[in-house]
Image (tube, rainbow, N blue to C red):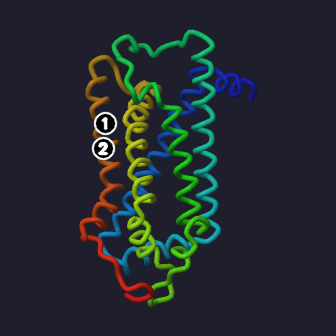
Amino acid sequence: MSGKSSFFGSSIGKKILMAGSGILLLGFVIAHMLGHLQMFQGQNAYNNYAKTLKDLGPLLWIARSGLLVVFLLHISVAIILSRENSNARPVGYKFSSTIQASFASITMVLTGLLVLSFVIYHLMHFTLGITNPEHFLLKDSLGRPDVYSMFVLAFQDNAIAGSYFAAMIILGIHLSHGIFSAFQTLGLNNVELNPKVKSASIGIAILIVSGYLSVPIGIFAGIIKPVTIGGM
């Protein structure tokens, strides 16, 4: 036990914890995006997807709690590593001399905290119904929570839409370096592969951001159409 404690208390141990938790969160971000894309299939499909998740009951809240723990672990380790790097000369990666610091890399803690702030707001809005209870109480003609109309109405509010767009751009900046950093930490790249891994990381981040933003863009463009509230 002490050996494990000393390993995860070391710099490399913390980096592995951050990389591992980051990969888990990336998986969730992709799965969540794919779920949101069902908005393009219409009200019935999306509300059925939302009901399927809700019907998981306690399992859903266990999954949410687990994700929250992973998220807080990821952020906490990142802050600790940032402080350690500020207080002492950081020990770079084996090939760090070939990597030029980027805006994304030097703002990882800040972008992570901003994403966390947005997640808290997002939960208050769409999961707990605290910020916009009038949206949260909507029902479709089958008596299901009308999450489809909730999204459509939400993105008709410029403040909500603007905050969502900003949050997704910030998430993309964070992921563009985070994915690359995880590969580095786990030793899955080298000098020759670095440019390809970096490009792939940016590409994945762009795809994820595009997927998330396609929903509000689809609403603005009239592709995702509003329905009569309380009806199909």
Taking the spot 58% from the left edge, 65% from the top edge, the residue there is: 131
Q: Farthest front residue?
A: 158
Quadrant occupied by the C terminus: bottom left
Q: Is residue 209 above or below residue 110?
A: below
Please state the horizontal and vertical placement of residue 103, each as a whole percent of the image.
39, 27
Crowd class of label 2 (few under 14; some 14 to 19; many from 20; radius 10 Å): some
Res 206 label: 2
Please state the horizontal and vertical placement of residue 29, each as a whole percent of the image.
44, 51
Taking the spot 34% from the left edge, 62% from the top edge, the residue there is: 216
Label 2: state its secondary structure.
Answer: helix
Say how many tags the image has: 2
Taking the spot 38% from the left edge, 42% from the top edge, the residue there is: 172
Position of residue 117 in the picture relative to residue 206 (left or right) = right
Label 1: state its secondary structure.
Answer: helix
Measure how far apart labels 2 and 1 are at the Cα level. Answer: 6 Å
- Amino acid bearing label 1: Ile
Quadrant occupied by the N terminus: top right
229, 198: nearer the viewer: 229
Dots 2, 1 in contact, CB < 8 A = yes
Crowd class of label 1 (few under 14; some 14 to 19; many from 20; radius 10 Å): many
Q: Farthest right residue?
A: 2
Position of residue 35 in the picture relative to residue 74 (left or right) = left
Taking the spot 29% from the left edge, 35% from the top edge, the residue there is: 200
Q: Is residue 44 above or below residue 150?
A: below
- Looking at the rendering, which quadrant does residue 175 occupy? top left
- Amino acid bearing label 2: Ile
Position of residue 103 in the picture relative to residue 224 (left or right) = right
Please state the horizontal and vertical placement of residue 189, each as a whole percent of the image.
35, 24
63, 151: nearer the viewer: 151
- Looking at the rendering, which quadrant does residue 105 occupy? top left
Res 202 label: 1
